[in-house]
Amino acid sequence: MRFSPYTLTTVCSLVAAQAYAADPPGEYIVPATQEVDPTRFGGITDKLNDWKVVIGAGAFYLPEYEGSDKFEVRPFPLFSAQFGDRVHLDIRGITFDVYEQSGFRLAVRGGYELGRQEDDSDYLRGLGDIDAGGVVGGLVSYQAGPFELYAEIDKTIGGSEGLTANFGAKVSHRYERFIFSADASGTWADDNHMETYFSVTPTQSFNSGLPVYEAGAGMKRVNFQGSITYMMTEHWMVTGAAGAGLLIGDAKDSPIVKDDVQPFARIGLGYRF
């Protein structure tokens, strides 16, 4: 099982919702009878609680690859951890907050991109594999109450050697044990990323039967999603979401793309230490 860059971003939005649920703003009171029994985990419970750790598992229903019109169910792990006030870890990698004050946040991060395998879908036969690579990037955001504006930029080292930027707005609202969130964003990609994921070279055309196609830099998609997280107890939570991405520009016109509308749904269960 391999996740596309888009899938990883979406998975991490779910983890982010769980991190918000793990430490929501304002008061959140759960009856004492629902508190964790320290004897269940021994000394590790206190340490994980200090680190603000959320673990769990979930399942995605989404396209086989970015641009496919065939869908599949993929299991995935949920994990997030915060060390102190500045270090955050999730399944995409590690983020370090360089500056945070009055709602502004500036962060740097490192992670990975898993690429794409030819056998991920019958549609990809003859196109070859896209190797995995490391990712370095940055994030800037501004939050005012439940509203947040953000911009991210990521550079892949190895694999596609691509540069992508994601920018958008999101809102979160807590009502009793429910946490609601909505997110709208757009994604820009450079020539390397677009050529790797959406172009068809003469050799690939010969092997796959698809026409030769050259994709250039530009906006490649817009994304919309909403999620609901329910805190069953102080520690257990269940969360679900649905949304869609709309491929645009050279990505939409690629012969690799069978449907420019890319819907998805997901559900997960998490435990906060």
Image (cartoon, grey):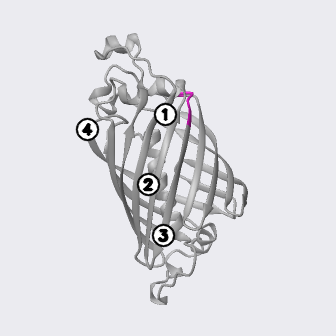
Question: Which label lies toward us, 4 or 2?
Answer: 4
> Which of marks 3 and 4 precedes in the sequence?
4
Task: Give the residue pinned by disc 3.
Answer: 173
Disc 4 crowd rating (10 Å Cα; few below 14, some 14-19, many 20+) is: some
**Which quadrant of the view contains residue 119?**
top left
- What is the distance, in whole Å, between disc 4 and disc 2 at their CAs? 23 Å
User: Label 1, on which residue?
Assistant: 219
Q: Where 231 sits versus 151, above or below?
A: below
The residues bearing labels 4 and 3 have C-alpha atoms spaced at a distance of 34 Å
Residue 269: % across, % down: 39, 65
Give the percent coordinates (x, y) of residue 166. Answer: 54, 43
User: Between disc 4 and disc 1, whose residue precedes?
Assistant: 4
User: Which residue: 48% across, 84% down?
Assistant: 30
Give the foreground label among 1 and 2: 1
Could you tell me which quadrant the N terminus lies in?
top left
Res 77 label: 2
Query: Could you tell which of marks 4 and 2 lies nearer the N-terminus?
Result: 4
Which residues make up the magenta segment? 159-164
Which residue has dot 4 on it?
70
Which residue: 48% across, 37% down? 114
Instruction: Tell me the distance, in whole angstroms, between the alpha carbons under discs 1 and 3.
Output: 30 Å
